[in-house]
Amino acid sequence: MKLNSIFGMPVFLYTILLFHQFHTKAETYLCNMIGDPKYPLLFKDGAITIGALFPIRSIETLPSFVFTKKPQPLSCSSVNLRDFRRAQTMIFAIEEINRSESLLPNISIGYRIYDTCGSRLSSMSATMALMNGQEFAAEDTCNGQSPIHAIIGETESSATVILSRTTGPFKIPVISHSATCECLSNRKNYPYFFRTIASDYHQSRALAYIVKHLGWSWVGTVNTDNDYGNNGMAIFLSTAKEEGICVEYSLKFYRTESDKLQKVVETIKKSTSKVIVAFLTSYEMYNLLELLSIQNITGLQMIGVEAWITAKRLITPNSFHILGGSLGFAVRQIYIEGFEDYVTKVFWETAFPCLHTEQKNYSQYAINCNIYQDLLVLKSFSDDVPEQRYASNVYNSVYAVAHSLHSLLKCKDGCEKDLLIQPQQVAEALKKVHFTVKMGNSVWFDSSGGVIAQYEVINWQQDSDGSVQFKPVGYYDASLPPDQRFLLNAENIIWVGGQLEKPRSVCSESCPPGTRKATQKGRPVCCYDCIPCAEGEISNETDSNDCKQCPDEYRSNAEKNKCVLKDVEFLSFTEVMGIVLLLFSLFGAGLTVLMVILFYSKKDTPIVKANNSELSFLLLFSLSLCFLCSLTFIGQPTEWSCMLRHTAFGITFVLCISCVLGKTIVVLMAFKSTLPGGNVMKWFGPAQQRLSVLSLTLIQVLICVLWLTISPPFPYKNMKYYHEKIILECSLGSTTGFSAVLGYIGLLAILCFILAFLARTLPDNFNEAKFITFSMFIFCAVWITFIPAYVSSPGKFTVAVEIFAILSSSFGLLFCIFSPKCYIMLFKPEQNTKKHMMGKTMTQNTLVNGQSLGSKPTKLMLWSGQPNLQTLIQLRTCGVISKMLFLKQNQEM
């Protein structure tokens, strides 16, 4: 159980009784001391008195509370050299002011310095003694006036909280030199509290900045379980969260809690973080250091605070193995001129009352030299004076009170001694004080009663002789602009264990560019997995939380750390597939031209004349256009090429099918005529054939014009099919227009196929309908299979499928219709005669002009006159039909 818990109730009752005495009317009651008076350790009389509380000794021995006899006074031991120096600094400053001719020229300042022994109980007792005085005469009345005008102290924040709350109702100003708890900045709760040190708000945040600056994201924290440690750590944890620093553990203990300390060390031993932020007082840090040394726990980078980072009591033979390389913030070291000589000479001659027995104002307790025996051994010791960083704060505190009194007493050439100064007046004057001390720094109090935060960054380093030195390696100055407040010279730092290389302390290694962080479930945000960015996403910085989507026309590179332009895909003239299709197109067109040349060279031969040479040449011309129109599908699509490729394809194929349809109709009508001299063929003469081809083609032209007018095809960047590349293709614009073009071609092809199918049984010597039927079958089969292949083909293969369909159907028409004729003209010229063309295939049982026609085919000569009806019937019955009508139509026979 804590000390304040044991004695909290008696102290509380004592305080209530004392308050009751203070509030009793002075003119009615005499002042009576309750209990024995408590005398200061160091004192001096003066016109104005300043009180002070310092834990000059650190160990308090409690008397026996048996309640059968009067308890003995508390006894203290183990000198705390740092706070003893602070008491000396206060006395030095007061003596300096008393000698001054410009500051309070004719006013002497006295002091009462109490030793609190680092105990809340002693601190409360000393506080009451400061406010009451020591002894009262029997006739004295309570005037309600405090014997002191201001109090310097306490050292620790928790003790200062007790002090400020106790003196607050009496409006006595308290000026602390080292109480840094942010809680004391609350002017509502502590309206008369001031300090010459900055609050922990700045130090706690600066601790987070130094951890962030050094790249540590995984730390452990330990703090003292009091107002100082709890408030300071709360600010650090909040700032660390803002800065993205994760805390593996956050523990606290008090100097008397050995069990909690043991748990803290066990946690540190099992942890994975290599950095510890220790928001501890020097007492707790000393206890932690001892236990870490016993268990030989090393290799931990300590980050400390001003309370222990420059405490020489922590320097032991084994401490550097643990605290070596520690970093932390310390109060700026300011040299006070003349102080070192004072602490070794003048102080010992003037400050101790036991050396001057003529002072009878205090009891025998005050002049008994036995209580100073442990202090007298320090009489000639001054090695620690240069490291007394709080000395300047105590010095400034005394001068702040002096300047306030100087303004209240209206001092110019002299001060008005008759003025009665109340402590509240001193507190109000402190709010306005602004002065410069001889060290050159200005002092004033802000709205919270504090001063500007100015720290040095200290590094524990070891000299060649083995001594530990506190080396400045940076600073933090809140008076500077935000971007200039913090400076750290990392190259001058010696790290834990005397290493030159900075230790690493992260829960997870950094995620390189191209990956993102994925938090591990149930663990802090600093513990994460590195997940590669998805396709089309990048991260171009380390430890990226998210991957960024690349713009539509960009893709991520292989490393996923940069967006690069997507490859544009289209059927090019330079790639293998484009070259192959180009060669086939040119081959088809060239072959067609050769056939045209061949047909033209043989235009006077019967086979050319008998096959309607005009439609044949027109058909060959349209087929050459069909082959060439496939070239418009190769190459990068443009606005004009997109419109040209589909319209040229539609018109040329309609022209081609129209010619085939015309040839089919002519053949069918000619051979379906009953009599050779009939009038049917006059409706299918050359003029009518040209008109039908033109009419059928104009319909397709009209469809294409409407398509181009309403919604023409256009170049389109297809980025949906592939994520890694752009397919540059021609969008159809109007799907209806494209469907109409294909549908019209299909309608003509089916009609042609049906008609040719009906004429497939005509005589072999002139049965062109068989070849047309087969060519139309190929044509329809190609374009029927084209539709699913076109829809399912990706990218440039869509265009390749369309070109393949065009070339296949064109080659089908070319070879099926014209190759038999070319074969006869080139390799069977004997069949390319009028005699052969007028031959008839008949069976031996067929009769012509009275002769018997058998079942064995024989060649028959055509008659020169008109056959009778019986002969035509016999010929049709046997499947033999004269070519006379067709030859007569062409006026070749």
Image (cartoon, helix red, strand yellow):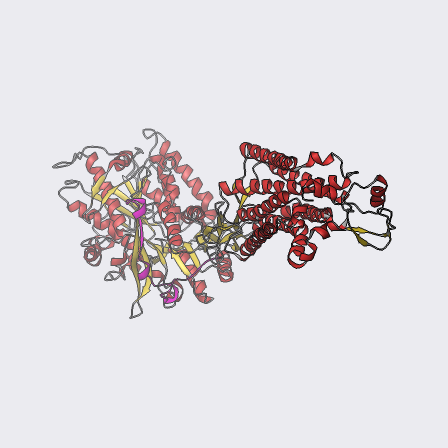
User: How many numbered marks are there?
Assistant: 0
Reply yes or no: does residue 407 show up in magenta.
Answer: no
Reply yes or no: does residue 503 show up in magenta.
Answer: yes
In the displayed orientation, state which residue is furthest to the bottom: 465
In the displayed orientation, state which residue is furthest to the front: 864
Percent position of residue 329, x then y: 34, 53
432 or 507: which is nearer to us?
507
Magenta residues span: 478-506
Q: Is residue 14 left or right of residue 852?
A: left
Position of residue 689 relative to residue 5, above or below, is above
- Quadrant containing the C terminus is top right
647 or 829: which is nearer to us?
829
Percent position of residue 685, x then y: 67, 37
Percent position of residue 383, x then y: 25, 62
Tell me the residue at 33%/38% (across/down): 448
Q: Is residue 634 visible?
A: yes
Percent position of residue 368, x then y: 28, 55
Q: Is residue 693 left or right of residue 714?
A: right
181 or 123: which is nearer to us?
181
Q: Is residue 36 visible?
A: no
